[in-house]
Image: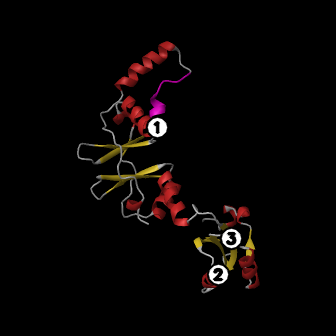
Amino acid sequence: MFIDKTMTKDVITIDPDASILEAKQSMETHHFHHLPVVDKDNTLIGIVTDRDIRSAMPSAYQTADEVAKGNEQLARLKISDVMTRDPVAISPANTLEDALLLMERMPVGAFPVVDEDRKLKGIVSIRDLMRAFINVLGIEEPGTLLCILAENKQGTMKRIVDAITEERIPFGSILVARHWDENKRAVFAYLLTSNVAHVKRKLEKLGFTLLNPMEWYLDQMPKRE
């Protein structure tokens, strides 16, 4: 799935010469945590977050005089003074997987989406990615998650899928995770039924090992170099 199918297109933006108080009000009104900063041509030049705004606000532990002085300074601050300049952005042609990998490597909660000329086209946040994957995985519908330990060889996935579909059980999704044993994979099948006892027995008779998906954890995956 491409980012342009998932991103928020009607983006609330802010001018670099706007005040911090304007940004604070906009975030509170629209319930956003990130505001792309654009010039008059809608070219992305920065991004400001609620954390940036909070950092600029007077501390609750200051005296009344310190707060008053801080508010005077705050009124003179512009978005350009606190924004992150030239933020990392992604293209509408990037995929959900691209965005997830980039977000995992960088401490940010959203990416502006821009074209080749850095014109703002949208914004994609963690919430957008979660919503997209909930849809892809089919987990909005009630069902049961199976974790099947399988050999990492050609034809194994077909055997699993055939065994389940022969029972006329619909799939919500099916994912494959790496396992600490390089010769094996953990297959996560989300089935749109609660009656899975018979298909579990069938898979075990076929030689597959059924694991408790609630006991699966990331440490079972191969370590990165």
Q: For the residues marked 2 and 3, what is the alpha-carbon distance in whole angstroms?
A: 11 Å
Residue depicted at x 48% and y 32%: 54
- The answer to whether residue 152 is above or below residue 18 is below
Residue depicted at x 36% and y 33%: 81
The residue under label 2 is: 160
- Nearest to viewer (mark 2 / mark 1): 2
The residue under label 3 is: 146
Q: Position of residue 46 (x, y in %)?
A: 35, 44
- The answer to whether residue 178 is above or below residue 129 is below
Q: Position of residue 177 (x, y in %)?
A: 62, 70
From where the camera sits, is residue 197 visible? yes
The foreground one among 20 and 183 is 20
Q: For the residues marked 1 and 3, what is the alpha-carbon distance in whole angstroms?
A: 40 Å
The foreground one among 113 and 166 is 166
Is tag 2's residue or tag 1's residue first in the polypeptide sequence?
A: 1
Q: Position of residue 71 (x, y in %)?
A: 42, 20
From where the camera sits, is residue 180 visible? no
Tell me the crowding category of disc 3: few under 14, some 14 to 19, or many 20 or more residues within 10 angstroms, Cα based. many
Residue type (three-letter) at the residue carrying disc 1: Asp
Mark 1 lies on a secondary structure that is: helix
Stretch of the chain drawn in magenta: 52-60
- Nearest to viewer (mark 1 / mark 3): 3
The foreground one among 139 and 125 is 139
Residue type (three-letter) at the residue carrying disc 2: Ile
The residue under label 1 is: 50
